[in-house]
Every structure is written in C-alpha cells, then in structure tokens.
Image (spheres, coloured by chain):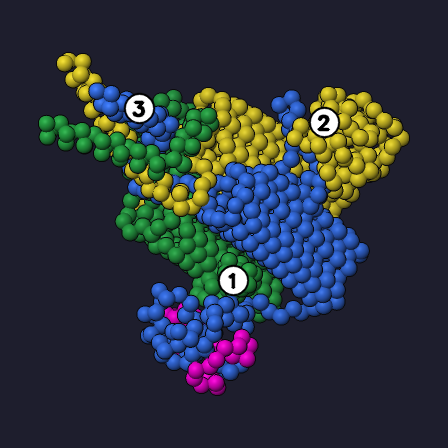
Chain colours: A yellow, B blue, C green
Amino acid sequence: MYRLSELVGHIGGQLSGDPDYCVSGLATLEDARSNQLSFFANSRYLKQLKVSDAGAVLVHASAAVHVPHNAIIVDDPYLAYARLSQLFDWRDAIQPGVCATATLDTTAQIDASAQICAQAVIGPDVIIEAGVYIAPHVVIGRGCQIGKDSRIEAGVVLYPDVIIGARVIIHSGSVLGADGFGFARHQQRWVKICQLGGVRIGDDVEIGAGVTIDRGALSPTRIEQGVKLDNQIQIAHNVVIGEHTAIAGCTGIAGSTRIGKRCTLAGMVGVTGHLTLADDTHVTAMSLVSKSIDKPGTYSSGTGLEPHQQWKRNVVRFRQLDELAKRVRSLEQTKAEDINKVSKT
Amino acid sequence: MYRLSELVGHIGGQLSGDPDYCVSGLATLEDARSNQLSFFANSRYLKQLKVSDAGAVLVHASAAVHVPHNAIIVDDPYLAYARLSQLFDWRDAIQPGVCATATLDTTAQIDASAQICAQAVIGPDVIIEAGVYIAPHVVIGRGCQIGKDSRIEAGVVLYPDVIIGARVIIHSGSVLGADGFGFARHQQRWVKICQLGGVRIGDDVEIGAGVTIDRGALSPTRIEQGVKLDNQIQIAHNVVIGEHTAIAGCTGIAGSTRIGKRCTLAGMVGVTGHLTLADDTHVTAMSLVSKSIDKPGTYSSGTGLEPHQQWKRNVVRFRQLDELAKRVRSLEQTKAEDINKVSKT
Amino acid sequence: MYRLSELVGHIGGQLSGDPDYCVSGLATLEDARSNQLSFFANSRYLKQLKVSDAGAVLVHASAAVHVPHNAIIVDDPYLAYARLSQLFDWRDAIQPGVCATATLDTTAQIDASAQICAQAVIGPDVIIEAGVYIAPHVVIGRGCQIGKDSRIEAGVVLYPDVIIGARVIIHSGSVLGADGFGFARHQQRWVKICQLGGVRIGDDVEIGAGVTIDRGALSPTRIEQGVKLDNQIQIAHNVVIGEHTAIAGCTGIAGSTRIGKRCTLAGMVGVTGHLTLADDTHVTAMSLVSKSIDKPGTYSSGTGLEPHQQWKRNVVRFRQLDELAKRVRSLEQTKAEDINKVSKT
C-alpha cells in the first residue's frame, strides 16, 4: 500500500487529488480498480482513460483533464510507470547466506551479503560480489565472476571464464560460455577448434530465458553495458553487442559480427557472420541481415503475409522475376525503337 | 503383451481375425513384425499395407480387404493408433512420495499421491495437487499451483505465480514466468518495467522442450485449455493463446498478441505484437504475421526455395520491384495512347 | 608453455625459426603478443601478418616469407590451428569418481574411469562407459547409454532410451528424447500420440547449447556420426541427419525429414516435414526448404535486406506480382500482334 504522496515523492511529478489516497498495485486503464494505479501513455486509450476506475492515473499535463479520479502529472507517464512498477516487483529481498544443499568449491569467494540458493554448484576460483542472488540449480564454472547486485535465475549455466558486471539479470535456462561453433574441415570430416575465449557481460545488462551466448574462439564474446536481450536469442562466438542495444526474442547473431550501440533488432532477425552494424541501426521482425550496414536507419527483408493461394502464385512469379524484368526491358527497347522510327519518318 | 480382443475392448472397432493373437508393440507398416500392431491411415502407403508383416493392422473398412493378417476395423485408424499408443508409453506409473534430496519450503502443500523426484526445489505457498509428477531438478517458485495429474519434466523452471491446470505436460528446459521484455526508454538507456502478472496454463495443455512463456506485465499471460505447443516456442508477455490451438516448433509470438481458438501455426512462424488472429486461422511455415487477421483461412509469406545463383538474381530484382511495376505501367500507358491515336485516325 | 619444436612434433610441418622458442597461448594476428602463436589462413589478413607481434605463426609455404618472427610451415594452417587449439582447451582432465551429491539408481552401471559431478541424477539401467564426463545437474533417464569418452555438460536432460556414441559432446541446456509433437485430431481436440521411439546419436557428434532432439514416434530419431549441431536447433521426431552434416544455430527440422550426408545448413533455416535432402546439399541462412532436394548444390529463399521505406513499396508489389506478370504477358501479346500486323501489311 502506498499513499499517492509517497509515490510522488518517489518519482516526482505533481499530484492532482488526495495525497493520502492509497493504492496497492498497478493495472491497465481498463482493468484497474479503485485501489490500483494506472497510466495513460498512448492516445489510443483516451476512451479507456475517461471511464477508468483506477484510483489514480499517471498522466501528462495535456491529458490530466480527462482523468476521472486522482492524477499524478508527469512529463513521461510510461517512464513513471516503469519506475513505479519496481515498487510492486515479485522479487523478494536478498536473504544473505549459502543454502546447505549448495555445492561450493573451497576456492570460491562469496561475499557475505550474497544469497546462494538450494543446490547451486559453484566451481573453483569463482568470485561472487556483494548483494548477488544465485537462484536454485545455477551452475557456475571455474573462474567466473559475478558483479555487485547481479541476479542469476534458476538453472542458468555459466561455463568457465564468464565475467559478469554489476546489476545484471540472467533469466532461467540461459547458457553462457558454451563452445562456439568452430571446426576445420579435413577429409570430409570436422576437426574441433577449441574455444579459448570466454564471455564478458557489461553492467546493467538483462538476458532473457533460454538465451545462449557462446565463448569466443580466441578472445571473449562481449555484451556491452545496458544491453537488453529477450528470450531464446543466440549469440555466436566473438560477437560484440554495443551499449544499450535491445534485441527481441528468437533473434540469432552469427560469429564475429559486431552490432553497434543503441540498435534495436526485432524478433526472429538473423544476422550472418563477420558483419558490422552501425550504431542506431534498427531491423524489423524476421529480417535477414547478410551485409554490413554503414548507415543508421531502419532495414527490412521478407515479404508480407497474404492468403495462401494468392501467395503460391506470387512465389512462382518470384522465381521468374529476373526473367520478367528482362521481358519488360525488351518491351521498353521495342518502344524506344518505335519512337526512333517515328522520329525518323 | 495385449490380445487383440483386449485392444478392441479398449478402442472399439471390429476384429477381423484371431481375438487371442498377441501383440507387444507398435510399428510402421514397413517395420512391423508379426508381434507388432500397425495402422493404415494414408492411402500413399497401400503398397506397404499389402505386404506388411504386422500381426494386426488398424484399418478403415474400405481397406480391410488388403490387410494380410489380422485387422481391427475402425472409423479413424489414426485416432485409434493415437489411443493405443498410450498403452505402450515410456512413462512409468507415479510412485507417490517426496525424494529425500528434494528441497521443499515448509509452506508448500503437496498432495500425498504426488511424486516429487530427486533434487526438485519447491518454494513457499506452492500447491501440488493429486497425481502430479515433478521430475528431478524442477524448480517451482513461490505461489505456483500445479493441477491434478500434471507432469513437469526434468529441469523445468516455474517462476513465482504460475498457475497450471489439470493433465498438463511441460517438457524439460521450459521456463514459465520469466520477466516479459518491457523497458521504457530514458536518455538513450532502458529502464526496466517490472512484470507483475504471472502465467495461467489451462487444462490438457502440452508444452514442448525449451519453451519460454513470459509472465504478463500487469495481468497474466494465458494459454487456454487444450493448446499444444511444440519445442522452442517463445510466448511473450500478455499473449493469449485460444483453446485447442496447436503451434509447431521455433515459433515466436510477440507481446500482447491474441491467437484465436483452433488455430495452427506451423514451425518458425513469427507473429508481431498487439495483433489479434481470428479463430481457425492457419499460418504456414516461416511466415511473418505483422497485421491482425480477421478472417479464418490459411496465410503465408516468404519466397520459395531455389538454386542460389538464380535466387541471387531474383533478389536483386525484388529490390527493384516497385520501379519495375512503374515501368510496366508506363508501357501500358504508351499502349493506351497508341490505341487512342489509332482510334482517332 | 610449449616449445615450437614440441608443437611441430604434435602437428607436423616445418619450423622456420628457433625450436626452443616458447608460446603459451593462441591469438589472432592482430592481438597476438610475442609469447603467443597465431595463424594465417586467409589472404585478407596479409597486412596484419606482416606486422604481427606473434612469437610464431602457422603459415602455408607460399606466405612464409611474410612472417616477421618464427614460422611453422604447414599445408593447411587453419587445420593446424584447430589441432593446436586442443592443447590450450579450457576443459580439465577427467577426475574419475562419483560426487556424493549425485543421485544414482542402483541398477545404473558406471565405469570406474567416468566422472559424475555434483547433483547429477542417473536413472535405472543407465550405462556410462569409460572416460565419460557427466557435469553437474545432468539428468539421465532410464535405459540411456553414454559411449566412451563422451561429455555431457551441465543441466542436459536425457529422457529414457537415448543411446549416445563415443566422443560425443552435448552442451548445456540441451534436451534429448522429449516427446515428438504428435497428435490426432478428434472433434476439434487433440489426442496425444505417445512417442515410443528413442534417440540415437552416432560417434563424434557435437550438439550445441539449448538444442532439442525429440524421440521418434515409433522408431528412433537418428543423428549419424560426425554431425555437428550449433545452438538452439530443433530436431523433430523421426528425423535422420546424415554423417558429417553441420547445421548452424536456430535451424529447425520438422518431423520425419531426412537430411543427407555432408550437408551444411546455415543459421535459422527451416525444413518442413517428410522431406529428403540429397547428400552434399547446402542451404543459406534463413531459407525455408519446403520440397525435397534431389540434386546436390546450394539453395536459398527469402529476399535481401533494404531500407524499410523502399522495402514496404516492394512488398506491396510482391503481393501483386502474379497480376504484374500477366500484365507484361498482355503487353507482349499486343506487341506480337503489332508485329504480325506490320508483317502482313
């Protein structure tokens, strides 16, 4: 339960209403009840705002007149919502200590303020800094380091030599530091190239569930500070992801590619290997990036969705597209010759 | 070992042959030996049927004459096969009890008929109903609930507030309830939006291996009853999947999208966020759905496979397609003018 | 630390320089210091070769003249690098024995030279051969078999009936033997088809992190010897992958498809079900294979990346492509008629 005056103290802004009014949670304009707070950040929802039962609404000054009950007037309601959401988070406070069922190597250094949960396995020479949370069943390999206040969720596996910054979150099922996919061909067989680099994760990175980030072949794979990765992303060896880039689910980045800073890649994007993407590059869903991008901007590939029967006909035509273009060229030449003839006559 | 009369008792149908004949397993028409049962559900396999060594075959009346040995005549041989397959399943019967190596919070309520295997970790306020199977290394967070006769396979992670119905199967490596991918932008950085909704899974849902289903931002992400999800599917926050929809492997559904009832999405389909797909919508493999679909039917995107050199030429032409279309328009206009001239002369 | 003469003893080749010179690691030409070894395998890096500080370089005879310091002259520098990388690998030598925190069924047979790490769970009738490494938190189901010198990394789950050859590596988070996605439709619901086949993995296979390989419906799903699978690959039930085929990350193969020998599938490729791909077939990134391929070669689908605004116009034209082709045909017919008229006059 928070009084509105407390919330204003927390995020700033100006209260229009009762400072002692209390809210106990967050909800959408449509779902919110009188004991909940909501936010208005998209003009499409004006109708919902006007009839919302929300006890209070985070709102820009320009729309405050439409709020039925209490309003907290802020410059950026969506940002204010993000900040207030943290007051209602599901995560419990850290309970420092090591569960008796965890397995720790004697050379591991665990800060006294860290929490190591049930059945975690922590290898030799690992360093766990202050305020770190290691969930049940996490496995941490030799020589890994987890920075201050980071949080490693259940079942994450860190292979040896993974260095993680401060305030990092890694969700369940993610695997960092597995071998990159490197083989030399020899007589129609594959000879394994051992992957000697590790992984470096910068401060304030969040990594979703089921993400794989391979160790580098020779030097580390690097995710720079502030990067946000959604679920089921695959980052191959030697990749570098620049600061504050955000990547949506199921995207894959092939080996040795460098993604710039502040980029956004939508879901299911593929980026082939050994490319460089400029800072501030944006790629739309399910696009394939197979050449480097030098110029910031938004890029796409693929075709649009259509009814299956129509699509089948167009797909056949796509296979003949080069030929079609040549036929058009030929028609144009005939026309040019005709014009030529006419002008000569 | 089952006598054919027992099998007929189990699934119905009419026996043409020896009721005391025994079979001990299932196999394809081609592989089956005399102690095995097979099924004929696709006319393409008529040749194999005629020479099959199978001791008995599930068959529609119209094809029974071609069965070399015993036949069990049923209306839907494929369905009959599905039902009989359950007699030969690899799953052992539940052995009620809690393994000594499991870690249970004292507030967890475990039905006496449930089985909790080695090294499972079960958090506070969890409710496990009758007949539930919790495999080794499963981690179940605070306040989760697992309905009657459900089965959670090895290594699954349930974050707090995941509510699961009856007779649900969740395969290994799946993660339910991790944070949805929500951030507000502030001065070129990302501010985390805590994800306060949980996950709700209806009765009779099956979830494949390596699936991720994120918790909702404010209210729960919902998978309705009878839904079947293949492996490595990504379901983002706030998504709703309607009853009896089936989704094949590697498909990703972005945030707040609602998929209708009885839909089928083939493998590697991408659906962008905030869309609505009508009931009975079908989408073919590797299609991108980037607009809502109002009308049931089958939809596709993409191009067909072709030899690489030919494809490269066509890809160049695709980039010029708008221009090509304009050139065709121009040719048509010239033609129209010519006709005009002719008709005037 | 290795003397160059030792390295030559290990991989063959001819030393040009000081046999007693010592190196302690591997690095790229650009990063290598004087105590490191590098390799020159791509003429694009000639500039870097000429100024490299590497203490020694693996090089073909034709380029040996450009090596600033010591050179090891070999036929295939990349292959030599692959072999030497194994001397610097991060994996520790096996320490035979079973950790006290592992849970073993009494019927499991574990070779005395195998290592079973913390909290592994090994089921009934499992056979673990000599030199096998089972990392922490691995779960191995009833009747599985792990061949000589194989290595199963942390958190891998093997369902019952998974048979693994010798010298296999399976990375963390992978799940082998989960149920294939098989259902019969009945009155708008799905009836589960129990999946009775297991999984067979040949010798010298490597499987990346987060890979799922489903058990067969009736007979086993099969990965033949020497196959290399990258991360997050999905292999459906009944699939067969031929010897020495390599598949890059995020690719999915649907049920009952057979991939030939020595194929390469790039990342994010989709292959639909019940197809056959010829030996020596290559498929480029993010292509969809929806028909069988009879002829070896390289295949592609999709469109190229382009600026978003231009792409949007072309996507509209793609939807009209069949119509456009018909309009071109009509123009050609008019032209043919004109020529006809001309020739008649």
Question: Which chain is disc 2 placed on?
Answer: A
Residue C122 appears at what percent x and percent y?
Answer: 58, 62
Name the residue beneath numbered marker 1: C185
Quarter placement of the C terminus of chain C: top left
Q: Report helix, strand or loop for mark 3.
A: helix
The answer to whether mark 1 and mark 3 are in CB contact below 8 A is no
Give the residue at x 65% y 42%: B238
Q: Residues within 10 Å of mark 3 (few under 14, many from 20)?
A: few
* Identity, as a three-letter code, of the amino acid under mark 2: Pro
Q: Which residue is mark 3?
A: B333
What residue is shown at x 14% (from left), y 31% (from top)? C340
Which numbered mark, 3 or 2, is in the foreground of this view?
3
Rendered view: C48 above or below B60: above
Give the Cα separation between the discs numbered 3 and 2: 53 Å
**Image spot of residue C222 (x, y percent):** 42, 59
Q: Are there few (<14), some (14-19), or many (20+) residues within 10 Å of tag 2? A: many
**Residue type (three-letter) at the residue carrying disc 1:** Arg
Task: Check the residue under mark 1 and report the chain it is in.
Answer: C
Q: Position of residue B217 (x, y in %)?
A: 68, 39
Q: Nearer the viewer, residue B9 or C36?
A: B9
Query: Tag 3: residue type?
Result: Gln
Query: Where is mark 2, residue-wise?
Result: A77
User: What residue lies at 55% left-to-right and 80% top-to-bottom?
Assistant: B9
